[in-house]
Amino acid sequence: MHYTDFSVPPNSNIRLAEQDPDSMGPFADEAEAQAYTTEQAEQLATYQDMLHAHGTYGVLILFQGMDGAGKDESIQEVLSYLDPQVSTTKKFKKPNETERQHDFLWRAAQALPERGEVAIFNRSYYEQVTAEQVYPEQIEQWGLPAEARENLWDKRYEQINNFERQLVENGFVVIKFFLHISKEVERERLLERIEKPELQWQFSEADLRHHQDWDAFEQSFDAMLNKTSTDWAPWHIIPANQRTFTYAAVASILVERLKELHAEYPTASDEQRQVLEQAREEFQKMQH
């Protein structure tokens, strides 16, 4: 698998209804996909260590998708291999009162990675061009002046593209995943949350409302993918009906992207080698 197999070209006219959410890719069964995921996730940990050692790039990994698409599970299965000392995860919920006193990108800017680090966004600022399109009454909570509401969605798409371009041009790689499931699989997974006591805490009334508004959400995601998949920060549509394939594809793409940044540890300079050699000699003198 190569990440271009899943990426959305800029200025596309993608429709999620025409994308297959059931693919298992090259894997014969779940066991094969799971074994591949484990192998890739272990490699990912190594490339993250190289990323940290160089301290040159930062990486932002972003997940979007319908309710029940597997955002939480993908983070747990694949990204749990990352070193928590140099990685962070932020789960984006509805903006709170403080966040609504700023522009819609402000809260994301507070959670961006440092150089040498990885930041993971479970949902993101893309909620403000998807959920808020479906439920425009949420716009009122931002207190926007009238002129800011004109052509609001086109403005926000452009602002997002500029925000991500600024990150990339400053050495921060943006990797975006859209986990694509079918309406029936979402129904089954949400019903599972209701029926299993250990999952009931995950369910909210909003889940039912969102499922009932599936078509509107799908249209908003279509627009998001087509308007904000760019050369510098392309979207990757990951088939997500089969969880094991989802994890395998996510892991594979992350390994490829991080390997492109650094495929080896930094080489010591002449000055550093001199320091190392002097330290070696001192340690050897300490032998008893």
Image: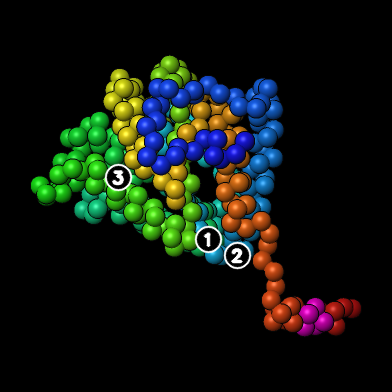
Q: Residue at x 44, y 63 (%)?
A: 170
Q: Nearer the viewer, residue 114 or 57?
A: 57
Locate residue 229: give its quadrant: top left
Vertical relation: 149 (above or below) 195: below
Q: Residues under labels 1 and 2: Cα distance?
A: 8 Å
Residue 54: image x %, image y %? Answer: 60, 65
Q: Amino acid at mark 2?
A: His
148 on left or right of 239: left
Q: Nearer the viewer, residue 29 or 155?
A: 155
From the image, give the main secondary structure of the stretch colored magenta.
helix
**Side of 206 where 254 appears, left or right:** right
CB contact under 8 Å: marks 3 and 2 = no
**What residue did someone put label 2 on?**
54
Q: Which element is circle 2 on?
A: helix
Foreground mark, 1 or 3? 3
Queried whether the magenta region covers residue 111, the answer comes back as no
Q: Which residue carries the number 1 mark?
A: 57
Callout 1 amino acid: Tyr
Q: Nearer the viewer, residue 215 or 142?
A: 215
